[in-house]
Image (spheres, rainbow, N blue to C red):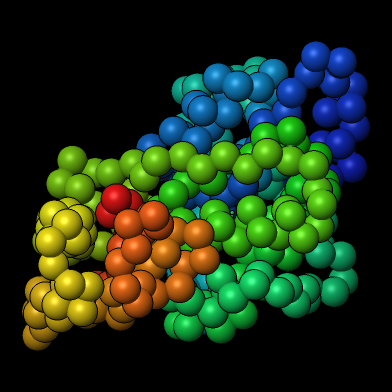
Amino acid sequence: MRVYTSKAELSAFISKESTTTFSLGFVPTMGALHSGHLSLVKAALAENTLVVVSIFVNPTQFDNPNDLNTYPRTLIEDVQLLETLSKTMILVYAPTVEDVYGSQMNAEKFDFGGLEFQMEGKFRTGHFDGVGTIVKRLFEIVKPNNAYFGEKDFQQLQIIKKMVGLTKLSVNIIGCPIERESNGLAMSSRNSRLSDEEKEIAALIYKTLQSVKEKFEFENHTDISTWVTTQFFNHHLFELEYFQISDTENLAPIQQKNETKTYRAFIAVFAGDVRLIDNIALN
Ligand code: PAF
């Protein structure tokens, strides 16, 4: 498998390969790949001639230095895992910070129309400016036709769609369903930092979201939020950071249920210092 650390070499190879019928798929990742990432790569392989997977732990999207330092970095294993899907149709771009940012590692400031102030934005200052900055740079380097993102980070997905609209970059953004462990825990690179007990008990997160979906048909959203809080109150392993039912389009918290709108429930939970997020479509 071809692994590039330099954007110049990556671009040179892609231009050599491209023909009039060529379509380039792109899956941006921070590595520590798992079946969730592989499902994005499979979707990209099914719809494109060539697929670039970037593996880059982006410093500008971390508000917590400890989270950045402890983020798993497993390039060799990641490449081996990708090779199980294809050795010839996938290129890996695993750049250095300098290759992406040059000498100025700064996040751009974006106006995402309020999407950035909801949920994750409230708890992770500057996170979405960092995500917008890196995804825009990667799009400029890779120049994909189609880019694939998981719905686990649904707020990120909406923000990237907004960024593409703002910057008028020519790329289709494709959202892919959440992949889950057999107990329902949403797949995440951070799961590797959970103990066996935490992993098992983390089934509570998705079970709670499934019950929220059932309750949403006939219960008031305030009562549902109170019920979710009680599920995690004084829990011996987990601490609830937030739970919110939002309008799918603008991610604003629900005020009054409107039958013409679609809603999603979002949750963030700490297991020790590992932060887990998940969400579910409600209607
Ligand atoms: O979802 C992620 O892994 C990251 O936020 C992304 C999109 C690769 C940008 O660094």
Task: Tell me which residue sits at (39%, 75%) in the image.
Answer: 253
Question: Image check: 120 left or right of 130?
Answer: left
Q: Is residue 274 visible?
A: no
- Quadrant for residue 228, please give it: bottom left
Q: Position of residue 129 (x, y in %)?
A: 67, 72
Please state which of residues 206 and 11 is positioned toward the viewer in this rendering: 206
- Quadrant for residue 255, please give it: bottom left
Please, is residue 115 above or below residue 151 in the view?
below
Q: Is residue 257 visible?
A: yes
Please state which of residues 64 and 112 is positioned toward the viewer in this rendering: 112
Q: Position of residue 40 (x, y in %)?
A: 50, 36
Task: Tell me which residue sits at (50%, 22%) in the image.
Answer: 85
Question: Image check: 4 left or right of 9?
Answer: left
Question: Image check: 227 left or right of 80?
Answer: left
Q: Position of residue 172 (x, y in %)?
A: 68, 39
What is the total number of numbered labels drawn onto the structure image? Answer: 0
Assign ligand 1 to one image quadrant: bottom right
Please, is residue 52 above or below residue 188 in the view?
above
Question: Image check: 113 left or right of 199?
Answer: right
Please state which of residues 83 and 216 is positioned toward the viewer in this rendering: 216
Q: Position of residue 154 (x, y in %)?
A: 46, 56
- Quadrant for residue 34, please give it: top left
Task: Tell me which residue sits at (85%, 21%) in the image.
Answer: 18
Task: Tell me which residue sits at (48%, 83%) in the image.
Answer: 122
Which image quarter holds the N terminus? top right
